[in-house]
Structure formats: structure tokens, C-alpha cells
């Protein structure tokens, strides 16, 4: 069991390259690389066992916040880290709330802990980037879920791991920020 040969390495290379192209400062680059180093294994773990372990999700969030705070201290642009913190707080609160209210039909707490680092990192670029990453994750999961359901590969009511989709959505949004004009 495990990832097909070279798929993990390919995913890591894509994530690292995307972060390298998008990060405007060294601390943001380090935050993105730290996140990517945590996120890539999470894709394969969640796909395999439908779990997002605390031993990776919590250090991912802590590292992102610490490095974004260093960026704010170095550049004296605290609005970015404040935006990241607010995005992370709002997204995590929504995910935890839906998980508690909907139970097994809602987001799992692992997803909420993952979204903490996703929305913090993307929140550095602003609300749109953070929302876009989560939105793309839901759209991607919905599309794949519909394909799996219509092809008969999964029964109605089956759960699919959301972590890989949120991580992919985050990488796409980071790539889009790299392509956006500076300003």
C-alpha cells in the first residue's frame, strides 16, 4: 500500500515550485514551504485512511503562524498576519461548528485542523485567496464525488476524504497569486 511510484515526489515538486513562485518574502516562502512539507504527506494519508493526524496538522498551523509573524515583524506589515489570523479563525470556526452540528455528515475535526493552516497561509494574501482555496476544495470534491457516484465506484452516502481537495485548492490559489500582478 502507498502512493504510486514518484507521485509523492511529483506532488511535492509542484507544491514547492508553486510556493517558490508566489512568495514575496523569505519568511512567507518559508511558511509556504513548511506548509507544503506538511500538506503533501497529508494528501496521501487522508486518501489512504481518511484521517488527518494531529501530529502533522497542528505543527503545520503553528509553523505557518510563526513564520507569518516573523514576516510581519521584519516587514512591519502586520495587516497580512492579521488577515491570516482572521481568515483562519473564521474558517476553523465554521468547520468545527458544522462538524459538531452535523456529526458524521459534516466536516471532521481533522479537516478543521487542516483548514487552520490552509486559511492562515492563504489569508496572508487576503480573504479572496483563503475563500478561493476552500471553495476550490469543495468544488473539486463535489466533482470527483459525482464521478465516483455516477460510475458506481462508491455507494450513495459514501464519504470521500476532503483533505486532498482542500490542499489542491490551496496550491491552485497559491499558483494564481503567483500569476497575479503585483500591487
Image (cartoon, grey):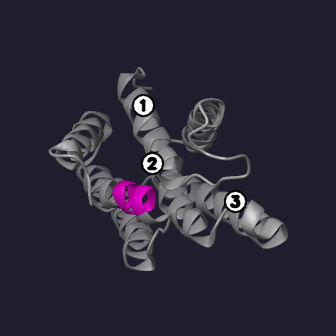
Q: How many marks?
A: 3
Q: Which residue is mark 2?
A: 167
Which residue occupies 78% across, 73% down?
100
Residue 17, by quadrant, is top left
Looking at the rendered structure, the secondary structure element under dot 3 is helix
Q: Which residue is mark 1?
A: 177
> What span is in magenta?
42-48
Looking at the rendered structure, the secondary structure element under dot 1 is helix
74 or 34, nearer to the observer:
34
131 or 7, nearer to the observer:
7
Q: Which residue is mark 3?
A: 90
68 or 63, nearer to the observer:
63
Looking at the rendered structure, the secondary structure element under dot 2 is helix
Separation (CA) of disc 2 from disc 1 = 15 Å
Q: Nearer the viewer, mark 2 or mark 1?
A: 2
Magenta stretch, main secondary structure, is helix
Residue 171 image offset from top left, x and y in percent: 40, 40
N-terminal of the pair, mark 3 or mark 1, is: 3
Q: Is residue 163 left or right of residue 55?
A: right
Residue 41 image offset from top left, x and y in percent: 31, 60
**Residue 145's disc number:** none
N-terminal of the pair, mark 2 or mark 1, is: 2
Amino acid at each position: 500500500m502507498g502512493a504510486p511510484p514518484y507521485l509523492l515526489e511529483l506532488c511535492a515538486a509542484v507544491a514547492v515550485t508553486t510556493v517558490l513562485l508566489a512568495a514575496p518574502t523569505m519568511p512567507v516562502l518559508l511558511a509556504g514551504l513548511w506548509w507544503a512539507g506538511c500538506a503533501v504527506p497529508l494528501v496521501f494519508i487522508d486518501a489512504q485512511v481518511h484521517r488527518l493526524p494531529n501530529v502533522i496538522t497542528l505543527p503545520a498551523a503553528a509553523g505557518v503562524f510563526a513564520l507569518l509573524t516573523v514576516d510581519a515583524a521584519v516587514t512591519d506589515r502586520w495587516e497580512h498576519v492579521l488577515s491570516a489570523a482572521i481568515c483562519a479563525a473564521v474558517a476553523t470556526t465554521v468547520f468545527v461548528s458544522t462538524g459538531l452540528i452535523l456529526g458524521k455528515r459534516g466536516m471532521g475535526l481533522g479537516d478543521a485542523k487542516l483548514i487552520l493552516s490552509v486559511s492562515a497561509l492563504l489569508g496572508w494574501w487576503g480573504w479572496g485567496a483563503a475563500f478561493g482555496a476552500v471553495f476550490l476544495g469543495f468544488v473539486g470534491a463535489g466533482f470527483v464525488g459525482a464521478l465516483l457516484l455516477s460510475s458506481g465506484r462508491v455507494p450513495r452516502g459514501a464519504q470521500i476524504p476532503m483533505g486532498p481537495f482542500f490542499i489542491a485548492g490551496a496550491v491552485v490559489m497559491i499558483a494564481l497569486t503567483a500569476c497575479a500582478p503585483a500591487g
